[in-house]
Amino acid sequence: MSHVPSLSARSCRAVSFFAVMIATWSAEPARGAPLAVGGDSLAGAASRVAIIREALAKNPGLKAAADRVRAARSTSAAEGRLPDPELMFQIWQVPFEHPASFRDSQMIMAGVSQTFPAPGSLPARADARRHAASADEAMLADRARDVVRDVQHAFADLTEAVARHRAHVEHHDVAARLLAASQARQRAGGPLDDVTQAELATARLDADIAMEAGSVARAKARLNGLLGRPIDAQMGDPRPEEPATIALSPQALTELAARTRPDLRAAGARDEAERSALVSAEREATLPSFTVGAQYFAPTSTMPVHGYGVSAAMTLPWVWGGGAARAEAARALVQAAGEEVAEAKLRIDVDVGTSLATAHAVATQLRTLESGARPAAQRAFDAVFAVYAAGRGDLLAVLRAEQAVADIEIDIVVARASLDHALADLDWAVGVLLPRTPLETPSSTAGR
């Protein structure tokens, strides 16, 4: 991995977990082992955090943005320096009859001059560039935030696809039991129709299993792409995780987002940059800049002595009014930047509120499915299957009960995936990977 200059310590602290991971691939190798999961280690079961670290370490867009931040920092340092001095050399009125006879010229002069911009304009201009670089640095963290969200959604899709495939395999085993029971009843004189219905159910599950296997392959290809790996690179199934939720209150999440959201910090830095640019524009509109110089005059035939000269000049910024117009434009940009900060704060409330409400709604649905619907469907199936296995009852009733169990299992898989998606959006809305707490469901409390 090529070396990318590390970000400033101040900004790394500000962007929290995202900057810690970015700093991992930005830092010198001697500063610590990288967080990235390299090589073929994803061939085994991979965790969500390991996948996120791998994506951040391999994303070329983040590395490019880090280089642009470095360039912006260097530019801000250059803006605070004086303009380059100017070295001059002049020869006046060399006769055409003797073009190489410099002593016959009227003047030979060498000099140096230096321009001094309007007092106070250089520090303000440098501050403007420095704040603009801080905004670029915050937007680097914002791009990392988007990468993390995309990876978490892709990981949730893969988790859902694997769980769907596993559920259909489990219900295929149940269908095989039904087929065996119907065949036993048919040998004992039972109806042949039961066997054909059981075979149809098994065949449908075979098709579902094949479809879900394709979904798993598609989800792995997408995740490999986000990780910068070949789309057909080997990747293990995701490491199983229990359903989780966020225990923080809406107010705590909103306050945390106000401190960590990189787009809000970027808007604030741009506001500071425009204010500093306004100071520079106002000074340049009201205060002149000066140029001073010193010259040396070599002896000529008309002035056969060594001599020196000095010069001084200043601008008149009040004559044509260009500086005043530029200052007025800067004031408008300050107003716009302040409104962008207010708009960024509004987005935080909307993003956090929407994502949290979705997470709570899906968590409630998941609890209801696991605590009520699934046990009821399983009891119904167990009852009708026991009757059928005893030689009584109707196979269609058993198939309907088994399908109800299968449907609820898929509903639970979808609800878990929806919860993962909602939590990914909530992480993105707040700006950090939030601490998750186990969601209390019958499956999570079993065996205690």
Image: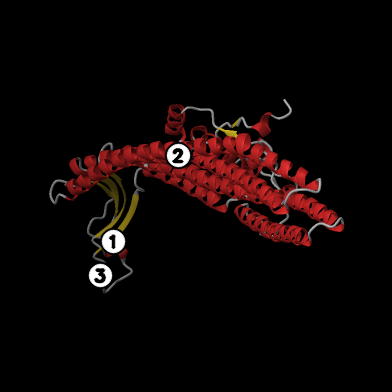
| Residue nearest the observer in this picture, 120 or 208 | 208
Of badges 1 and 3, nearer the viewer stands: 1
Kindly identify which residue carries mark 2.
Answer: 262
Q: Is residue 165 visible?
A: no
Q: Position of residue 69 (x, y in %)?
A: 47, 46
Check disc 1 and give the amino acid type. Answer: Ile
Furthest-right residue in this view: 187
Q: Residue at x 81, y 57 (%)?
A: 190
Kindly identify which residue carries mark 1.
Answer: 91
Position of residue 260 relative to residue 329, above or below, is: above
Kindly identify which residue carries mark 3.
Answer: 95
Check disc 3 and give the amino acid type. Answer: Pro
Furthest-left residue in this view: 319
Check disc 2 and give the amino acid type. Answer: Pro
| Residue nearest the observer in this picture, 90 or 353 | 353
Q: Position of residue 114 (x, y in %)?
A: 31, 46
| Residue nearest the observer in this picture, 442 or 212 | 442
Q: Which mark is residue 381?
A: none
